[in-house]
Image (spheres, rainbow, N blue to C red):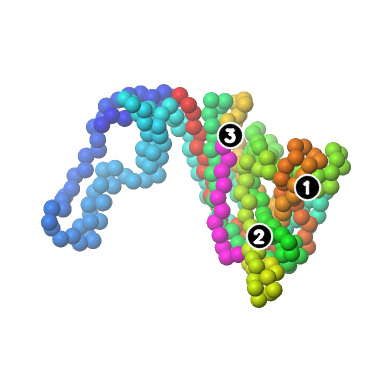
Amino acid sequence: MFIYIVVNATFVYREMEMSRIKNADPIKRGSSLSSTQINQQFTEVNAAFPMDGDNVRNEGIDQPVWDLNNGHGKSGIILVAADKNDNTTPVTATANSALDPESAPFTIQTWTLVQPVTTADVIRVYWQFDYQTVVSDSAPVNIVGKNGCVWGIWLEYQDTFGGSWQSVPNQGDFANAISGTPGSPTAWGSHTYNTYGCTIVPHALVLHDASYGGTKVWTNPVPHTGYGDWIYTPPSNITIYGLRLQIRGLLDRKFDSVIGSPSNAWRLLVTSSGVQTNTVSRSHMAYLVMRKQ
């Protein structure tokens, strides 16, 4: 079998022998099968070539199989680094109850790491989480004329050792000025062009109900899973020393034509303290650093 091996960001072409699978009692054509026999065959295959996370990563990403070119199959993309981090500690976020200054966001997950990213790299960060909201007051849900409100979950990073946390490039913290005049904002949130590293999740399900005369009513959502990603190529070499997920709400939509470029935005609302909540029961983050050869 011919494979490419990544050595110091260089493809080395070698010829290697495939892993040998030795079956103690191979299944013969036409024979009846039992679950014990089938399990034994898979056990022997896995012993010769473990179907674990490392091999899935090595065979599916390290190998140049993404763009098969005539003659060599080389894609020109290699994996520089990869890692993951899990969190199983539940975090309950309460809705924002003040403006200027706003209530502090809640931290869902913090991950300490040291990962260089050069201008030749692209870093891809992925996350997922399980969450459930509690809707205890209809006032901020906007059941008349609007379709509810949402929470913003976004990615932050540290680009200096022990330094301050900041939203990743092209992402705001949902507490930026979005309306008014420069120096005198009248609303806070994030323009949609500054939300490239976040996940927006609904706070309530809002629907029409004929039994209420066709008016909108709200209901608590069942537990859900959310997903998000951030993809970035830095303009200069950086080192990431930490990643974390933050959550803030409640938010609704607003069009801003005063501050910055005219754009849709997510506006941060003010609600009664402790009434509306979002509990993230667990979360997971992972990243890949890729490089073109």
As shown in the figure, which amino acid type bears the numbered disc 1?
A: Trp
* Residue at point 60%, 62% (across, down): 132
Spatial CA distance of label 2 from label 3 is 29 Å
Q: Which residue is mark 1?
A: 188
Q: Which residue is mark 3?
A: 232
Q: Quadrant of residue 115?
A: top right
Q: Amino acid at mark 2?
A: His
Where residue 187 appears, x then y in whole percent?
A: 80, 48
Q: Residue at x 65, y 73 (%)?
A: 210
Q: Is residue 170 located in the magenta-colored stretch of the structure?
A: no
Q: Pinpoint residue 91: horizontal percent, then vertical percent.
A: 63, 57
Mark toward the start of the polypeptide (2 vs 1): 1
Q: Is residue 71 above or below residue 193?
A: above
Residue hosting label 2: 203
User: In the image shown, does 212 or 205 lie closer to the viewer?
Assistant: 212
Q: Secondary structure at mark 3?
A: strand
Q: Amino acid at mark 3?
A: Tyr
Tag count: 3
Q: The residue tagged with tag 2: helix, strand or loop? A: loop
Tag 1 near tag 3, CB within 8 Å: no
Mark 2 to mark 1 CA distance (whole Å): 19 Å
Q: Is residue 92 visible?
A: no
Tell me if mark 3 has few (under 14), some (14-19) or many (20+) residues whose alpha carbon lies within 10 angstroms of its own: some
Q: Is residue 36 visible?
A: yes
Taking the image as shown, residue 152 lies to the left or right of residue 59, namely: right
- From the viewer's perspective, is residue 112 above or below residue 7? below
Instruction: Check residue 225 for magenta coloring.
Output: yes
Q: Which residues are magenta?
A: 221-232
Q: Residues within 10 Å of mark 2 (few under 14, many from 20)?
A: many
Q: Main structural element of the magenta stretch: helix, strand or loop?
A: strand
Residue 19 located left or right of residue 205: left
